Amino acid sequence: MTVVSPDVNRVGCPSRVILEHVTSRWGVLVLVALLDRSYRFSELRRHIEGVSEKMLAQTLQSLERDGFVHRAAQPVIPPRVDYSLTPLGTEAATHVRSITEWVESKVPEVQNARLEYDEART
């Protein structure tokens, strides 16, 4: 049996799916939020403005399946479920947060570039 090294550029490479989960809009925001602390589902939904309940649930499920998020259901009434990062999730979230911080710091430059682009075309 031949073992092929992961290559994100290769069709069918599992790294593509993992990359999609980690770098999707909601995946990034969930990972960065959970880097600060654990959240209950409703808290996380309020924290990440604009995410629907369905998208948040799907994102958390994908990240949990990939081993990035830990889901802890508490046997209490009403039910309580807490989400936190696993060690692998913390590692991924640290990298993702670096990108988000860089993007936030470059907003003025990108906005200026867009203005210049749009003005050159009108």
Image (cartoon, rainbow, N blue to C red):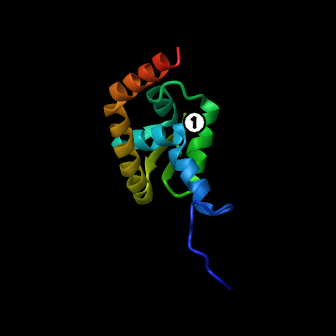
- What residue is at 52 percent from the left and 58 percent from the top? 67
Image coords of residue 21 (percent x, y): 56, 48
Position above or below: 93 against 120: below
Position above or below: 49 against 30: above
Say whether residue 13 is visible: yes
- What residue is at 60 percent from the left and 47 percent from the top? 61
Task: Tell which residue pokes out farthest to the top in this image.
Answer: 122
- What residue is at 60 percent from the left and 30 percent from the top? 53
Q: Nearer the viewer, residue 47 or 108?
A: 108
Q: Circle 1 sits on which residue?
A: 56
Residue 113, picture quadrant = top left
Q: Is residue 41 left or right of residue 52?
A: left
Image coords of residue 120 (percent x, y): 47, 19
Q: How many marks?
A: 1
Q: Amino acid at mark 1?
A: Leu
Position above or below: 42 against 75: above
- What residue is at 53 percent from the left and 24 percent from the top? 50
Q: Is residue 33 left or right of residue 54?
A: left
Task: Tell which residue pokes out farthest to the bottom in this image.
Answer: 1
Q: Nearer the viewer, residue 97 or 72?
A: 97
Q: Secondary structure at mark 1?
A: helix
Say whether residue 72 is visible: no
Task: Tell which residue pokes out farthest to the left in this image.
Answer: 105
Image coords of residue 29 (percent x, y): 46, 37
Q: Nearer the viewer, residue 62 or 44?
A: 62
Residue 60, picture quadrant = top right
Image coords of residue 101 (percent x, y): 33, 38
Which image quarter holds the N terminus? bottom right
